[in-house]
Image (cartoon, rainbow, N blue to C red):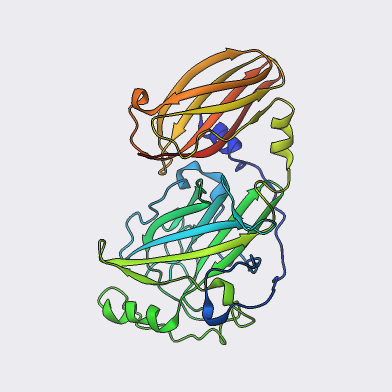
Amino acid sequence: MNRKDFLKGMGLAGVGLSLPTSKLWSKPLSGGDTTSDSCVLIPSETEGPFPLDLTENSAFFRQDVREDRDGVQFNLKLKIIGQSNCEPMQNVRVNIWHCDKDGLYSGYDNNMNPGQAGLTYLRGYQMTDANGEVEFTTIFPGWYDGRITHIHFQVYVSSSYSVVSQLSFDPDTKNSIYTDNSSIYTNGVDPMTFAQDNIFSDGYDYQIATLTENSSTGGWESYLEVTVQGEGTVGVGHIEKQNAKQFSLGQNYPNPFVGETTIPVSLNQASDVSVDLYDMMGRKVASVAPQSFSSGEQSITLNMEKLGLPTANYLYQIKVENSNGSYVDSKMMTASR
């Protein structure tokens, strides 16, 4: 399986996105709460000046996005919720990108980012697991003139619907990180307020992530629930339509599972089907050789012990080949104890 097939299977290659452009509000949360039973849509924000296209390189499929960047370790967890039923959304792609401790973004070389062209630090994407969650290991971001400390993220539901937003933090807690680590964050505390920031000045109740110390890492961790339109997979774009003419890939069952699980596949015609498993750093860790199936409902059983794989989240990708061509699709699964 080459990178091009991998990207197509995740809906990441050659996709035109339809992005909401206005903020969507309901009754505001009190005290900057990050959870709510009302499932209020996350406000949509500008991508910012540096939204390096993560869809063009499967190397960005990773949990740890730090590369060589110095800074306080920061673990970020996002939970994606479908607005229609307030339930977690599985198999949704989530991108993040943010500046380093000095306010620089990778991938660009201009007056604001001298010497950063071709670099890829502090960018990455994951697929939500059975709980609708993604986790990233990064560094706590710095800040730059004109913007309060923030992290960009995109929730890509399908090739016809995604949303881009930003998150930030409680100012006092955030600035304590800069103060306590002044030898690293040499720009000092962030002087901006939400009222002065042109992105958050019109409201930020649903965009303030938690910020707590992590004693095991010596760093910090953060959590935010993000509500987007839909229930499960929302919208059907070109890639999904093309796959639907040939096959449909189901969620493995049980999921989460212990030891063994089954992947259901519905084929519209006789096809050869193969399976590749990827870990959360985008490395292919196991493969199941192609099997020939007739049309109809089929299944592929995976035994993690036989594959030599530990308990963890994995992305499973199938490739369907028949007289019409090759088609790929993928979903997340969770092997537990």
Q: Is residue 221 above or below residue 277?
A: below
- On the image, the x and y values in percent for residue 244 come to 72, 31
Give whichever of 34, 239 is nearer the camera.
Answer: 34
- On the image, the x and y values in percent for residue 162 come to 66, 55
Give whichever of 131, 195 is nearer the camera.
Answer: 131
In this view of the protein, can residue 206 be seen by the observer?
yes
Q: Is residue 164 above or below residue 7?
A: below
Going 54% across and 63% down the picture, which residue do you hit? 225
Give whichever of 42, 55 is nearer the camera.
Answer: 42
Specify the quadrant of the image occupied by residue 179.
bottom left
Q: Is residue 40 left or right of residue 304?
A: right
Q: Is residue 285 above or below residue 117?
A: above
Going 60% across and 67% down the picture, which residue do you hit? 37
- On the image, the x and y values in percent for residue 166 come to 55, 68
Q: Is residue 300 above or below residue 92?
A: above
Q: Is residue 217 left or right of residue 192?
A: left
Going 42% across and 43% down the picture, which residue do you hit? 280
Name the quarter where the C terminus is drawn: top left
- On the image, the x and y values in percent for residue 56 come to 56, 45
Q: How many marks?
A: 0
Specify the quadrant of the image occupied by residue 187.
bottom left
In this view of the protein, can residue 119 be seen by the observer?
no
Going 49% across and 79% down the picture, which residue do you hit? 148
